[in-house]
Amino acid sequence: MNTPEIQKTGFLQKYSYLIFGTYNVKHFRDNISFDLVQGTCFFIRLNGVVYLISAKHVLTPWDPDRNIKRANYPDTLSVRLMDVEGTYNYVPIDIKAIKDTITGDSYFNDPDVFVIRFDDTAGYVINSIEKFIRPFKYDYGDKLAMWGYPLKYHTITHDNFTLFKIQNSSLTTGTFHASSINLSKINYLMKRDDPRQKFGCSGSPVFLKSNEQPDWVFGGVFIKSDIANSDMDSAYRLSVIVRSKFVCIKLPNWHE
């Protein structure tokens, strides 16, 4: 799909942020290796407070596919923010207490979304999406767009870690396809316009443009790159998005 509406989505790019963490760090002489958690996150301001939002499986060790807590996970994640002078900063988020206490369920029973209060905002440019949160009705063919950080580096080394940290987000487009599997009311399916893998985009804010409305609205959170379907050799893939309602109700004192 290459409509004028989809082409004009560059202004949405600033709302998606890179988030990552490292663990199992190993040193051998002059070499270093480690495992990496990578995702995308975004911000919402509510009643003067800033909240960071991403997929639950990014911000915590909960695995909604296997319905278990992963044994190995970082104690700290870093979100990439730009300061007022235009320099990248990597702000640490301590998730150890969350990591130790997290529980959950499968992604079609428990929204794969997690919200953290984010107080460390001084001096940083925080682009938040609350102005896009408006009532709307999902319908087949609604246009969808998101900016995220698909996995580019399958092996992270000392040499390419800097390139990883300064990477740019990329655009994914598609349409509302159907309600998700298992008759879930929590999720819906996005029919993507390209077949490329989107691992690393989990937690991206998804924006929706209804056929009946002129403006983009907040459509939910990207949580799963591909699900099995009967036409996997086609030019598109189906991804899972958490509906915006189930994101907003996780915000403290949220009122529709």
Image (cartoon, helix red, strand yellow):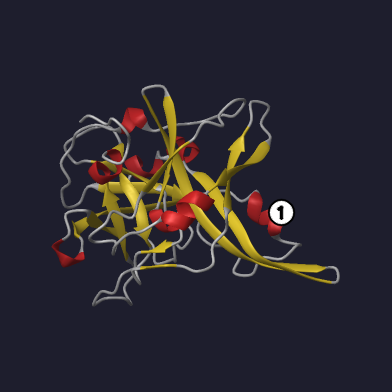
Q: Check the picture and name the quadrant holding the C terminus.
A: top left
Q: Quadrant of residue 120?
A: top right
The quarter in which the N terminus is drawn is bottom left
Identify which residue, 74 or 222, lies in the foreground: 74
Relative to residue 60, is residue 138 depicted above or below? above
What residue is shown at x 49% (from left), y 59% (from top)? Answer: 200
**Which sits in the foreground, 143 or 1?**
143
Q: Is residue 52 visible?
A: yes
Label 1: element kind: helix
Which residue occupies 66% across, 39% down? Answer: 89
* Residue ranking furthest to the right: 29
Q: Residues within 10 Å of mark 1 (few under 14, many from 20)?
A: few
In the rendered view, tell whether residue 140 sits above or below residue 195: above
- Res 5 quadrant in image: top left
Residue at (45, 47) in percent of width and height: 147
The residue where tag 1 is placed is 162
Position of residue 182 in the picture relative to residue 113 (left or right): left
- Residue 216 place in picture, x, y as percent: 30, 36
Amino acid carrying mark 1 in the image:
Thr
Q: Position of residue 169 (x, y in %)?
A: 52, 49
Tell me which residue sits at (31%, 70%) in the image: 227
Which residue reaches farthest top? 48
Q: Position of 128 compared to 229: left or right?
A: right
Image coordinates for residue 28, horizontal then vertical, percent = 81, 73
Residue 201: in sight, yes or no? no
